[in-house]
Image (cartoon, rainbow, N blue to C red):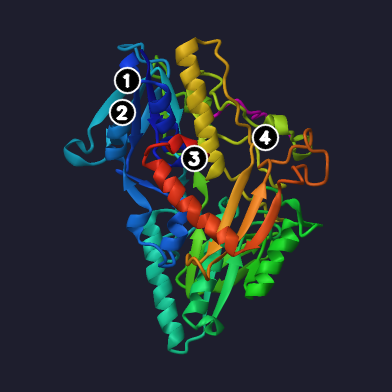
Amino acid sequence: MAQVVVLGAGIAGHTAALYLSKFLKKEDGHSVVVVSPRPTYNWIPSNIWVGTGKMDRKQVIYELEPIYRRVGVDFRQAFARTIFPEGTAENERPQVEIEYSDGARKGEMERVEFDYLVNATGPKLNFGATEGLGPQTGNTVSVCTDLHAVEAWEKLQEIIERAKNGEKLRVVSGVGNGTCTCQGAAFEYTFNMDHELREAGVRDNVEVVYMTNEAELGDFGVGGMVFKQDGYETNSRLWTESIFRERDVHAITGAAPQKIEPGKVTYENLDGETKELDFDMAMLIPPFSGQDLKAVNREGEDITSTVFNPAGFMKVDGDYSGKPYEEWDPDDWPRTYRNPTYPNMFAAGIAFAPPHQISKPRTNPNGTVITPAPPRTGMPSGVIARAVARSIAALIKEGPDAKLYPASMTEIGATCIASTGNSMFNGTAAGMVMDPVIPNRHRYPNKGHRNPKRTRGEIGLFGHWEKLLIHYLFVYKAHGRFGWSLIPE
């Protein structure tokens, strides 16, 4: 009999929990416990549509407890606070201390024992990394959560009404710090704003600006892509620049916002210059850090730095030696996402510590880091979570010598579909497929170091239909309904 505790119920955590409930039957005495501070699951990719009024918030969030009750998972609405991987002097079993976040038990602390643990806590939205960033200050909006997206739509509606009255305005979408990831979300929101402004007939009155820490358009935090389109070889920079020209969206690349005041962002660029940009609305993605989780050994000593990296992400089977960029290798990246110190603990999705960036690291003359962090969201999160669930199930059923299931980002691909609008007939999308996510020069010695047949970009209505299909398929999958496991990650 084994108990598996999953921390977090986002894409990675929820996927891991569903598969663990499938692989480990309660009749055999096994149990799966999910710990998450929110009572709902948020299908984050569709927050973009909430942020432009194309979907209601209720269409992207779902109550977790009924889903878990149906599949036999024990749900605790709580924050994970401290992991005791060696147990304590009073109880030798590994435990995690949680703090209930709602209801009659709000604020109450409890320790939950585990045989295996999956850290899928996702990111802490680090708005504090840039002065004045985020909805809390009121200076910028966000689409990182469902509630943030509702606020973004309210702000965009104000812009549309002001533009209808003849005002000349500027909206900015992008990143709020030089170390951000999730450029894809900012890119998508930019063109959804453009679409809404055009539908409202006010695009001529509103300048749309994309601000990014990418050194060039099309980098997306993965070092860019080389692919074939219409029989010709091209790259993601040229492909992306053509979209910006077509839509008359202005781009500021290599930017690191330093301070955001009402209606003004001050930023540094890669040349070390400090510049200012006025705006009437800004949707800026924050940088991510790990959640505030601690680790303590049996003697009561803090071992957080042993289990987590300085940013709060859990160390797994990657190479964290800090080698120079010129020596980076695909084999540096984790394969099984197992913690090297405590082999009964795994991490999935954003919660695992990447060994280094994917894009070339850049620092400006002032010492400011302006480099996208590695993306680990969406499709890779789900694929990794499924592999981790399979590995844990194998260890429980077959013993410590069981085969673990790999899901290296140097071997798995990902699809990113950036939509505009959500109508079946007038929507469009920029669809990108990269295989693998991280360039693998060992497997693909060609230019770009990815599969040239499967790495590509397309623009059109079909990609928009795919985005809609993915939304409804993954909502179905998230509910754990009949046949859910047949839908691939």
Identify the residue under disc 4.
411
Q: Which of marks 2 and 4 is nearer the N terminus?
A: 2
Q: Give the residue type that dot 3 points to.
A: Ile
Q: Determine contact: label 2, label 1, CB under 8 Å.
A: yes
Q: Which of marks 4 and 1 is nearer the N terminus?
A: 1
Q: Give the residue type that dot 2 points to.
A: Gly
Q: Which of marks 1 and 3 is nearer the N terminus?
A: 1
Span colored in magenta? 311-323
Q: Give the residue type that dot 4 points to.
A: Glu
- Looking at the rendered structure, the secondary structure element under dot 4 is loop
Nearer to us of marks 2 and 3 is: 3
Q: Determine contact: label 1, label 3, CB under 8 Å.
A: no
Nearer to us of marks 1 and 3 is: 3
Q: Residues within 10 Å of mark 1 (few under 14, many from 20)?
A: some
- 394 vs 42, nearest the viewer: 394
At x 40% / y 42%, what residue is drawn? 478
Q: Is the magenta stretch mostly helix, strand or loop?
A: loop
At x 63% / y 32%, what residue is drawn? 408
At x 34% / y 33%, what residue is drawn? 35
Compute the Cα span from label 4 to label 3: 20 Å
Identify the residue under disc 3.
487
Identify the residue under disc 2.
72
- Looking at the rendered structure, the secondary structure element under dot 1 is helix
Point out residue 419 in the picture as x, y percentages from the top left corner: 54, 62
